[in-house]
Image: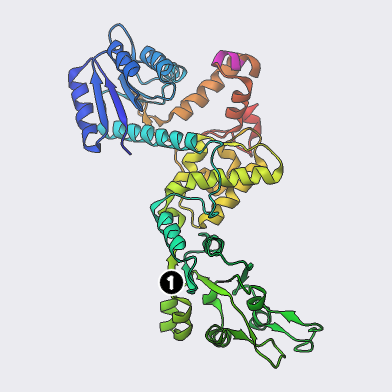
């Protein structure tokens, strides 16, 4: 993640050491020896991150931070200070600093702070780009990662052919959406019909696919058209075909070869003109080798293969998908769409998503349902996601304590509340927050704090 970074320090040795440490990461780096020079550079060019010494002549790092945030409101600021106490941290926090590192500078701590700042800037830009203009593409598939671009490219090239397609991928990756995209771009005028082959007993599945005549089995009181014929002129999506039993596989193979079906209890064949798209989360080659899947059926359905990558392999799609699901859930609830906060975005990007896109959709639907503000907070996420990002550690110096700016902010808010005897309106004025922002910060559990859903009194 290449970014523009400005280093400001009046100590030439420290300045050279910091620049040298960052050079291998191929960022665009500028440096200067004073706060005044740093402001001139910030007024002339856009930067992502400012790393500044606190103790500089004429202008301190805190004052530089305050003025820099006026010039560039979205600038991430890391303060270098030899006085790593709560008072300095509080002053830096109120000036708009994102992080601070004590001197003498430990390079690994500084690099970690810069990496956090760069990552947060990338998330901020992605969240801004999503905005209200984001919409679902005509294919119905949200995602611009290289893996999904390959999928969409294949879909576009094979959609109008009549070849059978096998869509492979883990559960929840969106295989049915790929099948629908194939159908939508195929030009076929018939219906898109989907059936989950693993969700039905074999006898019921046979009746669903082929249909039945009256009296074919108990309770078969009327004729029923099977899905092969119902989808005539369209597409039949056979989901989880790998879970189909061997006997049913034989019947399916015959239907695909002959392009006809015989309803249960019937005496005549019924032809169909239906495009077949199958999907599986299993390794069908291994199933063939284990005699669990017919080899001839495998080659029949595997004319064209499309592999849908799992979500953890296309993390750049997470935030656009999350935004899409938030908008969808908000619309379903008849409410204005809430926004993604940076803290929530960080949790989403740090999580491994074993349940893939389906898990993300469920998480966003849950978050929208429980949201109390116009911006999602970490407490709105399912419990498994809340701890996806650990607190960002920074060195506080003399006492050797490791903590984070979030913890510093939490302590400072509590200190102000104590000073005004819990009066939230007065605390908001002292802190420079509006009351809604203060309430949101009090509701959101901080790292290691006593504020949690099970301890709401700590926020009062």
Image location (x, y in percent) of residue 35: 30, 13
Within-10-Å neighbours for mark 1: few <14, some 14–19, many 20+: some
Asked which colour scheme the image uses, the reply is rainbow
- 247 in relation to 385, above or below: below
Q: Which residues are magenta?
A: 427-431
Image location (x, y in percent) of residue 394: 37, 30
- 438 in relation to 321, above or below: above
Q: Would you say 217 lies left or right of 176 here?
A: right
Check residue 116 for magenta coloring: no
Q: Residue furthest right?
A: 221
Q: Would you say 161 lies left or right of 330 here?
A: left
Q: Quadrant of the C terminus?
A: top right
Q: Can the viewer see residue 88 in this picture?
A: no
Q: Pick whichever, 354 or 176, lies toward us.
A: 176
Q: Residue at x 50, y 71 (%)?
A: 280
Q: Residue furthest bottom?
A: 267
- 266 in relation to 361, above or below: below
Q: Residue at x 43, y 25 (%)?
A: 74
Q: Disc 1 marks which residue?
A: 304
Examine the image and state in which quarter residue 381 appears: top right
Q: Quadrant of the N terminus?
A: top left
Q: Pick whichever, 452 or 325, lies toward us.
A: 325
Q: Would you say 66 lies left or right of 242 here?
A: left
Check residue 430 for magenta coloring: yes
Q: Can the viewer see residue 442 in this picture?
A: yes
Examine the image and state in which quarter residue 189 appears: bottom right
Q: Pick whichever, 416 or 198, lies toward us.
A: 198
- 111 in relation to 231, above or below: above
Image location (x, y in percent) of residue 78: 35, 25
Q: Residue furthest top?
A: 58
Q: Secondary structure at mark 1?
A: strand
Q: Residue at x 29, y 34 (%)?
A: 111
């Amino acid at each position: 993640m290449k970014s523009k970074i400005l280093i400001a320090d009046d100590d030439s040795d420290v300045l050279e050491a910091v620049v040298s440490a960052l050079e291998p990461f191929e960022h665009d780096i500028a440096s200067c020896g004073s706060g005044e020079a740093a402001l001139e550079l910030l007024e002339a060019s856009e930067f992502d991150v400012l790393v500044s010494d606190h103790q500089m002549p004429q202008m301190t790092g805190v004052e530089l931070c305050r003025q820099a945030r006026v010039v560039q409101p979205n600038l991430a600021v890391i303060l270098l200070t030899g006085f790593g106490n709560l008072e300095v941290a509080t002053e830096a926090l109120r000036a708009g600093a994102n992080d601070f590192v004590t001197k003498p500078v430990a390079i690994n701590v500084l690099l970690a702070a810069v990496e956090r700042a760069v990552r947060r800037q990338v998330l901020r830009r992605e969240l801004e780009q999503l905005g209200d203009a984001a919409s679902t593409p005509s294919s119905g598939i949200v995602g611009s990662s290289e893996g999904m671009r390959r999928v969409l490219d294949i879909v576009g090239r094979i959609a109008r052919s009549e070849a059978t397609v096998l869509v492979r991928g883990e559960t929840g990756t969106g295989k049915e959406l790929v099948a629908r995209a194939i159908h939508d771009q195929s030009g076929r005028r018939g219906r898109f019909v989907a059936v989950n082959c693993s969700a039905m007993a074999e006898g019921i599945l046979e009746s669903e696919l082929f249909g039945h005549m009256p009296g074919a089995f108990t309770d078969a009181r009327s004729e029923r058209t099977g899905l092969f014929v119902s989808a005539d002129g369209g597409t039949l999506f056979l989901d989880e075909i790998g879970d189909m039993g061997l006997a049913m596989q034989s019947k399916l193979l015959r239907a695909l070869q002959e392009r006809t079906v015989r309803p249960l209890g019937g005496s005549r064949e019924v032809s169909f003109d239906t495009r077949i798209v199958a999907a599986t989360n299993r390794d069908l080659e291994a199933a063939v080798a284990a005699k669990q899947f017919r080899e001839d059926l495998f080659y029949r359905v595997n004319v064209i293969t499309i592999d849908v990558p799992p979500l953890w392999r296309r993390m750049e799609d997470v935030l656009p998908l999350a935004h899409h699901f938030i908008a969808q859930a908000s619309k379903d609830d008849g409410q204005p769409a809430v926004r993604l906060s940076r803290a929530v975005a960080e949790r989403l990007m740090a999580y491994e998503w074993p349940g893939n896109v389906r898990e993300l959709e469920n998480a966003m639907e849950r978050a929208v349902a429980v949201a109390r503000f116009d911006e999602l907070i970490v407490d709105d996420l399912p419990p498994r996601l809340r701890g996806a990002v650990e607190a960002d550690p920074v060195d506080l110096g003399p006492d050797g304590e490791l903590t984070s700016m979030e913890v510093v902010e939490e302590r400072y808010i509590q200190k102000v509340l104590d000073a005004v005897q819990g009066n939230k309106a007065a605390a908001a004025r002292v802190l420079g927050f509006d009351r809604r922002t203060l309430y949101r910060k009090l509701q959101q559990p901080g790292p290691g704090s006593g504020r949690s859903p099970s301890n709401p009194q700590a926020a009062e």
